[in-house]
Amino acid sequence: MAKELLVRSQVAKEDTWAIEDLYASEELFLEDAHKLEKMIEELEEYTESDLTTSSLHLLEYFKKLEKIAILLDRGLSYSQRNGDVDTANSYYQALNGKMIGIFHQYGTVTAPIDTWIASMEEEKIVQFYKEMPELCNYKVTIDDLRRLKEHTLSPEMEKLLAASREMGTAVEKTYSLLADADFENPMVADESGEMVKVSSGRFVPMLESQDTRVRKETFKAYYARYEQYKNTFASLYEGKAKSNFFYAKARKYNSSMEASVDENNVPKEVYYNLIEAVHENMHYMYEYVSLRKKLMGVEELHMYDIYMPIVGEQKEKITYFQAQEEIVKALQVLGDDYVSVLKQGFENRWIDKYENEGKRSGAYSAECYSVHPYVLMNYQYNLDSEFTLAHEMGHALHSYYSAKNNNIFDSKYKIFVAEVASTCNEALLMDYLLKHTTDKTKKAHLINYFLQQFRTTLYRQTMFAEFELLTHQMVEKGKSLTAEALKKLYYDLNVQYYGKDIVMDDEIAIEWARIPHFYYNFYVYQYATSFAASMALSKKILEEGKPAVERYLRFLSGGCSKSPIELLKDAGIDVTTKKPVREALKTFGELIKEMDELFA
């Protein structure tokens, strides 16, 4: 592990993503940004009469909207990708701010038009489709607007709400700048005594150390910085929760959660079913904690011990290119076309590989409809990074297939299914690696990693989802989200989810402050539901072969052409029931038993 991070200008070109595929020069980007502003202004020339009495005018509107959406998507990708690799660069932050302003201008102008379309009589829409069959290209978009009719306000109110969105984004922007750019990361001595700056990307790898002192000091030092600003973080989170509730109430929903899931066309019962199914199977988590304590041979198991591999340190460093090669082999089960696109992404710089000073933490895949997806990594030469790369390329290929087979509107698959392709890739990679090793220690490391996936995705993300639900319910009842109230709630949830065989260190109470996903408006539950769905899908792919692969590729190509629930049902998975979660947790229990038997 390098002790000092490179600044962005020092990073080798081959390790960066091909930003030039978006725009060959900044001048071309600025030209398109100016063009976009003009095109959006032109949309204001349409009247309600134009669009609701003339099928030709409605078709013209959607064709213009499609051109704007493609340009806006490209421009936002350019500004965001540049900003994310150097969050302290004020110039790129300003460019990104400009594009976000244009995005909100787009939303403000189209908001009242959406209400006109939503309020049209069904007979009139059907007549329009007959008069102008080309309008059917936009039927999914039109139907989705009309599905939300009862939660759509007057044109004036929609315009006002849309205009307010830009102010609302200040909370998450402030959070990101505080956590990723302004904080001074703590320094901790590693196993050899050398001082290492504990960045977001290095935090978990440091907690995987075999040295208890390193784990403990990293844990305490890293969370101390959040504790120092606990009131600021609590204020930011309360602001986000209040913002969510404001928009939910404005749209006549009973709760923030209900508004969020309905936007993705997902029944709220899916959210409750997830939490209930996990609560009903909490014994597996307690068995895991007990096994970890036993195999680590410690009298006390602490929260800073739960990332360390329970089978000892994995000495082998996994290079980025080794990970890439193994991922390609593992995903051969998805067919030649899938692998061809995967290689294209690896070979044509879709990926920004390594951490640098000021780079956004974590990893993500971002679609760009008219170019190709972009994947941000902070690769750390370990098994976790290898699986993260497989995960993000799952997102990338989902975006690729959706863009290839749909117009830009229909390519934007709902967030609910966004994590399915990524975690399915991980499951297939795990199956490949387990099948291609006879070494007991390596197998134990892989099972350890898989067990961690269940802990961090099915249990931990469900705990996050419960925290998010309970905190929003507090706001909805008029209660304040003070730092102490948030810490107590989060601490108590950890006690409930981890059980009695672990020491609940005080620092864990502030962990909520380092989770950026709490600013994504009920996003986290989808990691858990998607993980359960992907476990079932990967099993079908491996057992059934071609028929299951064909269904899966149709799912990847579906975009939002159907509701996320229907898309998954077509692939053979019903997430409206508790069955996928229960079966996934049963697999977790079997893996716990297998790991225990390895060391019996």
Image (cartoon, helix red, strand yellow):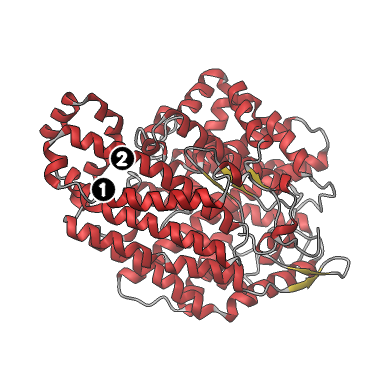
Residue occupying the point 27% across, 54% down: 109
Residue behind mark 1? 43
State the image coordinates of residue 409 (x, y, percent, origin top left).
36, 39
Residue occupying the point 25% across, 30% down: 135
- Please identify the quadrant where the C terminus is shown: top right
Instruction: Compute the Cα span from label 1 to label 2.
Output: 8 Å
Q: Does any portion of residue 448 appear in the rendered image?
A: no
**In-image side of 71 versus 124 (left or right):** right
Instruction: Tell me if mark 1 has few (under 14), some (14-19) or many (20+) residues whose alpha carbon lies within 10 angstroms of its own.
Output: some
Residue 228, picture quadrant: bottom right
Closer to the chain start, of discs 1 and 2, is: 1
State the image coordinates of residue 325 (x, y, percent, origin top left).
74, 34
State the image coordinates of residue 282 (x, y, percent, origin top left).
53, 53
Q: Secondary structure at mark 2?
A: helix
- Residue 306 vs 147, above or below: the answer is below
State the image coordinates of residue 178 (x, y, percent, origin top left).
56, 72
- Please identify the quadrant where the N terminus is shown: bottom right
Residue type pointed to by label 2 = Lys
Q: Does any portion of residue 92 appear in the rendered image?
A: yes
Task: Answer whether labels 1 and 2 touch (C-beta < 8 Å).
Answer: yes
Which residue is more in the foreground, 366 or 53? 53
Q: Secondary structure at mark 1?
A: helix
Instruction: Tell me if mark 2 has few (under 14), some (14-19) or many (20+) residues whose alpha carbon lies within 10 angstroms of its own.
Output: some
Q: Which mark is residue 105?
A: none
Residue behind mark 2? 64
**In-image side of 268 versus 334 (left or right):** left
Residue type pointed to by label 1 = Leu
Which residue is more in the foreground, 539 or 88? 88
